[in-house]
C-alpha cells in the first residue's frame, strides 16, 4: 500500500512539473517527485539512499522556489495536451510495470519510468530554462532511484542528488539571436 502511494506521489510531482510554468508550481512538483521517489527507494534500497535523494530534491526545490517567474501558473491556457500526456504516460507506465516486466518493486519501476518520461517530455517541449532545469533535476533523481533496481553502492544516488541540486543553481542567460 505504501509503495503505491509513494509512486502516485512521484507521478503527481512529475505531472505538476509538466503542467506548471511558475516557480511555485515547479518547486512543489520537484518536492513531491523527490519525496515519492525517496519513499519508493527507501522501501527497496534502505534509508540512506532515500535520504540522499530526498536531500538533493529538497535543495533543488528550495532553489526553484527562490528563482523563476513568481506565480503558480498551473494549467495555463493551452495545457490540455500536457494533461493528456500525464494521464496517458501513467497508464502506459503502469501497464509496463505491472504487466510486461516481472519481479519485485513494481512501484519503483512505475515511478522511475513515469517520472523519466514526463521529465524528458517537459525538457523537450519547453523553451523556459527554469522549467528545463527543474525537469532535468527530476530526471536525474528518477535515474538515481532506478539504480536501486540493480542494487549496488551509494554512488548513483549521490551523483543523482548532486546533479539535481546543482541543476537549479546553474546561471541562466537570455537567448541571443542574430
Image (tube, rainbow, N blue to C red):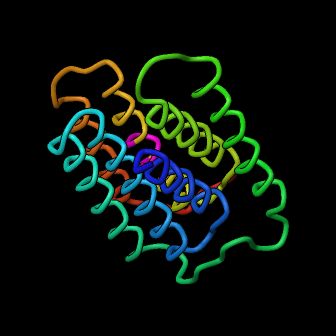
Q: Position of residue 124 (x, y in %)?
A: 66, 42
Q: Residue at x 35, y 36 (%)?
A: 145
Q: Position of residue 86 (x, y in %)?
A: 70, 50
Front-most of residues 143 and 168: 143
Front-most of residues 14 and 100: 100
Front-most of residues 157 and 167: 157
Residue 138 in the magenta stretch? The answer is yes
Q: Which residues are magenta?
A: 137-141
Q: Name the main secondary structure of what is drawn in magenta.
A: helix
Q: Residue at x 29, y 40 (%)?
A: 43
Q: Residue at x 38, y 54 (%)?
A: 34
Locate residue 41: give its quadrant. Answer: top left
Q: Position of residue 6 (x, y in %)?
A: 43, 51
Q: Residue furthest front?
A: 1
Q: Position of residue 170 (x, y in %)?
A: 36, 55
Locate residue 156: give its quadrant. Answer: top left
Q: Residue furthest bottom?
A: 71
Amino acid at each position: 500500500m505504501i509503495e503505491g502511494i509513494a509512486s502516485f506521489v512521484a507521478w503527481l510531482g512529475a505531472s505538476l512539473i509538466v503542467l506548471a510554468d511558475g516557480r511555485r508550481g515547479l518547486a512543489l512538483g520537484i518536492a513531491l517527485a523527490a519525496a515519492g521517489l525517496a519513499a519508493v527507494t527507501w522501501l527497496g534500497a534502505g534509508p540512506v539512499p532515500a535520504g540522499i535523494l530526498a536531500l538533493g530534491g529538497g535543495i533543488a526545490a528550495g532553489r526553484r522556489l527562490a528563482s523563476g517567474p513568481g506565480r503558480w501558473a498551473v494549467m495555463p491556457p493551452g495545457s490540455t495536451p500536457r494533461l493528456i500526456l500525464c494521464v496517458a504516460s501513467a497508464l502506459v507506465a503502469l501497464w509496463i510495470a505491472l504487466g510486461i516486466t516481472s519481479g519485485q518493486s513494481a512501484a519503483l519501476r512505475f515511478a522511475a519510468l513515469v517520472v523519466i518520461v514526463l521529465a524528458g517530455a517537459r525538457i523537450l517541449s519547453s523553451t523556459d530554462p527554469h522549467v528545463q532545469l527543474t525537469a532535468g533535476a527530476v530526471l536525474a533523481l528518477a535515474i538515481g532511484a532506478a539504480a536501486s533496481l540493480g542494487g549496488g553502492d551509494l554512488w548513483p544516488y549521490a551523483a543523482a542528488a548532486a546533479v539535481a541540486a546543482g541543476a537549479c543553481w546553474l546561471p541562466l542567460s537570455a537567448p541571443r539571436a542574430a
